[in-house]
Amino acid sequence: MRSLIATTILLIAWSAVATQNYRFDQLNVADGLSQNTVNTILKDSRGYIWIGTNDGLNQYNGYSFQVFRHQNANSNALKGNKILTLLEDTEGQLWVGTASGLCTYDPEQSKFDPVHLSSDPSSGPGHQYIRTIEQDRSGRIWVGTLSGMLYVREKESVGFKPVLFASQPVADVSAICEDKQGTIWVGTDHAGLYYKSAGSEGWAFLPIEVLSGGQGLAKTIKEDKVGQLWVGTQGAGLFKISTDRSGLSHYSAAGTPGLQNDLIKSLAFGPHGKLWVATDGGGLSIFEPQTGAAQHLGYNPYDPQSVASDAAYALFRDEEGLVWVGTFDGGVSIFNPNHKAFHHIGRSLVNSNGLSHRSVLSFLEDRNGDIWIGTDGGGLNIWTPGADQFRVLTKADGLSSKVVTSLCQGPAGQVWIGTYRGGLQQFNPETGHLETYKYQSGNPKGIRNDNVWALLPQGEQHLWVGTLAGLDRLDLATGSFEHWSTFSPEGEEAYAERVTTLYRGPSGMVWVGGKGVRYISEDLGELVPLEVSSGSTLNQFDSRAFLEDAAGRLWVGTEGGGLFIRSANGSEIRNFTMSDGLPSNAIHTLYQGEDGAIWMSTNKGLSRVWLESESGELRYRNYCKQDGLQSNQFSYNAGLQTRDGHLYFGGINGFNYFQPGLIQDNPHAPEVALTGLKLYDQYTTPEDEDSPLQKPISQMERLVLSHQQSQLFALEFTALVVCQG
């Protein structure tokens, strides 16, 4: 076998592979990561993500980071800040390899215990530089170092002993792997792999001739599901060793267009058995193991959902199928195959296949099915769904403002454009002509304010115009504006007239957003506040969104007050807030899907809510940025339901669009961990006097409180996930 593999080197020609769209979420220093150079990633059995960087070890719970660093005066701190490799053993103990030594982490005491590999003072500093840690199926722990030493700790043993596996001096042990047959494989700076078969006393060497002459260090070794070994090297590309270990296939950047660099840092098997290859300078390559076809994924500075850097250093796939990518300078990129079917379109800086501005404020679907998108500084974008390019209208084309706050289409096909500080404009799509209506002092029939936040056609002859100074009705024939005011009972303070949204439901009633809830009474010729019971707080909040559902109920989204639902006969108004499970008390838009569920955008993602028919209880599913949303923050009024049922929601990083029926729940139930205990509104720790904690709350299996403590306590917890469903 050794002579055959030494002489049979097969260069695989690249074959076409069907490309898949890979979208990544990002974690970096802006999110609390200690540093953006990530060398290793691990998810432990409790659900925590551990991220090793050049400046500390990070524990991530799906929402926030806890950072561990070396402390000179603390013998129970990390051995060093440069974290190179991580392992959780079968007992649940975390092993941390650093550039300054090896240690284990005790979560019960929240401390690190140093592990001594050698007492030989002549072993040099490279002996402390831990390259790799692995555990085999028999329970042995294997450690490789930069000095070329390989150590093993037997399952029942306390200490490590050196392993003499090579007849010639080895300068670097950087990869260890156990295959399905129990053979231990070791990658070094020698031109091949050392291996020890199960039950064998001695070590053998499997040469790879193309590595001779220092062509490449065996950096990482993985076995696929059929038993083939994959070897990534530091300079010679990727190798595949056949199941019987008699054949070798070589993939290099020169011969494999899907592989753009031969400096391979890490390997991992992702969803559908595909091999992920992280390279230093060439981004990622996704291989089909059986065909050798590869797809390249690179960093795109204009795409926030591309991998964060072309220098990819670490790969880890968790049990949910998420692939975590550690990079040299971009932190962590996360590919989630369970992403909901939220399509995201953001800003493009170099061409017309993206938005002209990242922040979206308004939408319109015109008669042709084109989508008009108003932005907060980039003018107006026009997009045909499925097309690559956007058309843009800016101030150079006659727009009166770069900020487009509202849109609607009139009966003659004209597009009405509401702006911030630019008044109202009428655009003729056929001629491109723009007509502008702006405030004129002393003109009683002109628009009353240049900040136009809501538009709604009324029949063939009129247009409702909501401004920050109140509601106007435009006569389309004469171009004159009629000013409407809100009815205020005698003796009461005049009503705040600002109008932020207009909605006409199936009942024909026009609801007006702003202070409280109002509706238009054409009989009275004014706006009328909705009457509510003395116990309701509805009119204390600004209303931002309305929806009349199929059962005749009125749903009202507010700024700060959460969601209100008024019964069809008006006899009852119920209020739901974050305490009931909503992601935010700021609700911007409301739409009903074909299944009857209500979709709403908020300051903290999207939520799908519905009322149980029998109990009347509110049920919900919340979705966040990690589910594929443009951001957790969405914009007022920036929503649309198209004629074919698609929903559009705009926010601070572009917009999402999707078919509600394609959004499925995440099948993976999250791990839940306790993170804190408060007694009398103060955090308590095991060190506090009279604390009920004998160890950190996350390690407690049973908690006993005194009678006095049980009167005022609070438990904090987190769901150990990177996406919500």
Image (cartoon, rainbow, N blue to C red):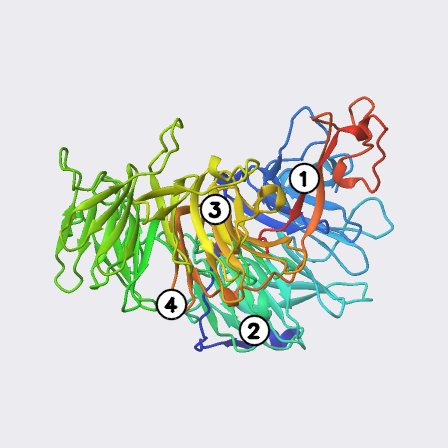
The residue tagged 4 is: 643
- Whether residue 574 is visible to the viewer of this picture, yes or no, is yes
> Does label 3 or label 4 sit earlier along the sequence?
3
Q: In which quadrant is the C terminus drawn?
A: bottom right
Q: Which tag, 4 or 1, sits closer to the chain's start?
A: 1
User: Compared to 605, does 708 lie above or below?
Assistant: above
Q: Mark 1 or mark 2, which is nearer the start of the sequence? A: 1
Tell me where residue 692 appears, x and y as whole percent: 82, 30
Tag in front: 3 or 2: 3
Q: Considering depth in this image, is 91 or 23 the residue closer to the camera?
A: 23
Crowding around mark 3 (Cα neighbors within 10 Å: few <14, some 14 to 19, many 20+) is many
> How far across and how far down the image is residue 584, in percent?
53, 43
**Could you say which disc has been placed on residue 101 in the image?**
1
Q: Is residue 687 above or below residue 550?
A: above
| Tag in front: 4 or 1 | 4
Q: Quadrant of the N terminus?
A: bottom right
x and y, in percent, of residue 30 in the image = 48, 39
Amino acid type, residue under disc 1 in the picture = Gly
Tell whether label 2 touches label 3 (CB within 8 Å).
no
Q: Which residue is mark 2?
A: 289
| SS for dot 3 | strand
